[in-house]
Image (cartoon, rainbow, N blue to C red):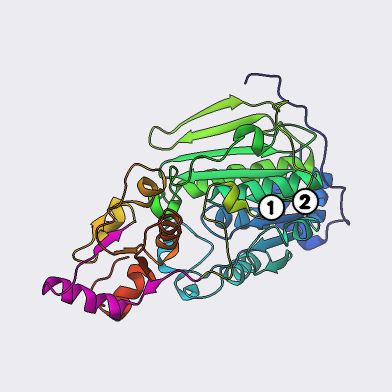
């Protein structure tokens, strides 16, 4: 995939209004850099940047974009802050647990730099809103951790001819690149096809080295600043890869694939494109509640009934906390076809909160499993209602 690196297309944003006395003081360390200077800082002031996800990568990205003086920051996220986020999502604090992530991130941004205009999009990004949301920004930063959203972001940006900075992290490894349809390769050139469902764990499944978020997130912001101001050589046509255990960086070159057809319109269902069960608003998956599962387990112990209780989380999660009597079969092994669950007894699946178990359940039902359900709310609901002494998750 070796090729000449695409040339910098020039500054993405025109200079904004003259800097105020307060801005001159705040951004003085930028202003004395010849490559940035007054003109570059005014471009940052005039820039509109959308950050997708106020999570691991979005946290450092939002803080450094705000500190750099980006005039308008958009945040799109429909999740709430969980205690497990605090290990790496530094834009949130203990007092934010339970709050919407977008609102929590806004407060941190404005505490750091009240001169920034923050726009909240407290909604899930999907095919119905992506083009409308993206159209209001000059540049997008994508720090999401699932392939369906990454393809959606790529296609929406490609259709609108907008550049975006992509970052990805898992365990100790991270990747960064810049994609811009018409100026260089896109995400579809790097990944023409989505990996088979279940073969690549999310951060929730595989874990992530907390500080890796800052390492990759800061590189993403550096690329954003370079694009906005027109300085340096952006990562167009290059993918930067970090192994944080070895603390080594390497680079691969990437060029547009002439066989890759860039989309003219968004797909209706990106999860289905990635091999995941298609979203169906009218479908209610069969489930059991924590108290009902408690009774069923008690009956199983007494020999009254029998069923398979299958934990579809990752081994590291099961080491932290588990439900007695559950068999560990990670989601990826089921979806990838490595494991065929038995059909001789009813099956009850569980994960952390119900998302992965519902995905595996849909997979089983499509393959003719007659009696399969999942634990509503996952092990978190189980701990809350049945075994509150089990904590640490």
Mark 2 crowd level (few <14, some 14–19, many ≥20, 10 Å Cα): many
**Residue 329 x/y as whole percent:** 29, 52
| Residue 114 in sight from this viewpoint | no
State yes or no: discs 2 and 1 in contact (Cβ < 8 Å).
yes
Foreground: 283 or 99? 283
Residue 307 versus residue 41 in the image, above or below: below
Query: Is residue 306 on the magenta stretch?
Result: yes
Could you give the CA–CA distance between mark 2 and mark 1, rounded to whole angstroms?
Answer: 8 Å
Which secondary structure, mark 1? helix
Query: Is residue 301 on the magenta stretch?
Result: yes
164 relative position to 326: left or right: right
Q: Magenta span covers which residues?
A: 284-311
The residue depicted at 19 percent of the width and 67 percent of the height is: 306
Q: Which mark is residue 98?
A: none
| Residue 41 in sight from this viewpoint | yes
**Residue 195 x/y as whole percent:** 51, 39
Residue bearing the label numbered 1: 68
Foreground: 290 or 138? 290
Quadrant of the rendering where the C terminus is positioned: bottom left
Q: Which mark is residue 44?
A: 2
The numbered mark, 2 or 1, whose residue comes first in the sequence reads 2
Which secondary structure, mark 2? helix
């Amino acid at each position: 995939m070796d090729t000449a690196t695409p040339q910098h297309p020039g500054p993405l944003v025109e200079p904004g209004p003259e800097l105020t006395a307060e801005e001159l003081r705040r951004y003085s360390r930028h202003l004395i850099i010849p490559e940035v200077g007054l003109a570059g800082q005014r471009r940052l002031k005039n820039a509109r940047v959308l950050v997708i996800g106020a999570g691991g990568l979005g946290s450092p990205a939002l803080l450094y974009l705000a500190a750099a003086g980006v005039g308008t920051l958009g945040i799109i996220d429909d999740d709430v802050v969980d205690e497990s986020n605090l290990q790496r999502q530094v834009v949130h604090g203990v007092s934010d647990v339970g709050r919407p992530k977008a609102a929590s991130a806004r407060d941190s941004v404005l505490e750091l730099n009240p001169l920034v205009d923050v726009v909240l999009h407290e909604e899930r990004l999907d095919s119905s809103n992506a083009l409308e949301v993206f159209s209001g920004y000059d540049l997008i930063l994508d720090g999401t951790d699932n392939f369906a959203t990454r393809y959606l972001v790529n296609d929406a940006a490609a259709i609108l001819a907008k550049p975006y900075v992509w970052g990805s992290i898992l365990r100790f490894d991270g990747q960064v690149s810049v994609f811009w349809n018409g100026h260089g390769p896109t995400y579809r050139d790097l990944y023409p096809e989505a990996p088979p469902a279940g073969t690549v764990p999310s951060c929730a499944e595989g874990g992530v080295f907390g500080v890796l978020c800052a390492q990759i997130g800061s590189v993403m912001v550096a690329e954003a600043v370079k694009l906005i101001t027109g300085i340096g050589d952006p990562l167009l046509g290059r993918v930067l890869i970090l192994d944080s255990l070895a603390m080594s960086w390497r680079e691969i070159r990437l060029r547009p694939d002439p066989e890759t057809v860039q989309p003219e319109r968004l797909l209706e269902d990106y999860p289905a494109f990635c091999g995941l069960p298609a979203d169906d608003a009218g479908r209610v998956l069969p489930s059991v509640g924590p108290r009902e599962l408690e009774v069923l387990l008690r009956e199983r112990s007494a020999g009254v009934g029998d069923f398979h209780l299958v934990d579809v989380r990752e081994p590291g999660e099961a080491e932290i906390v588990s439900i007695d009597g559950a068999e560990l079969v990670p989601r990826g092994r089921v979806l990838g076809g490595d494991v065929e669950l038995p059909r001789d007894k009813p099956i009850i699946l569980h994960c952390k909160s119900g998302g992965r178990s519902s995905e595996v359940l849909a997979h089983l039902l499509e393959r003719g499993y007659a009696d399969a359900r999942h634990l509503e709310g996952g092990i978190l609901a189980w701990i809350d209602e049945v075994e509150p002494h089990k904590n640490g998750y």
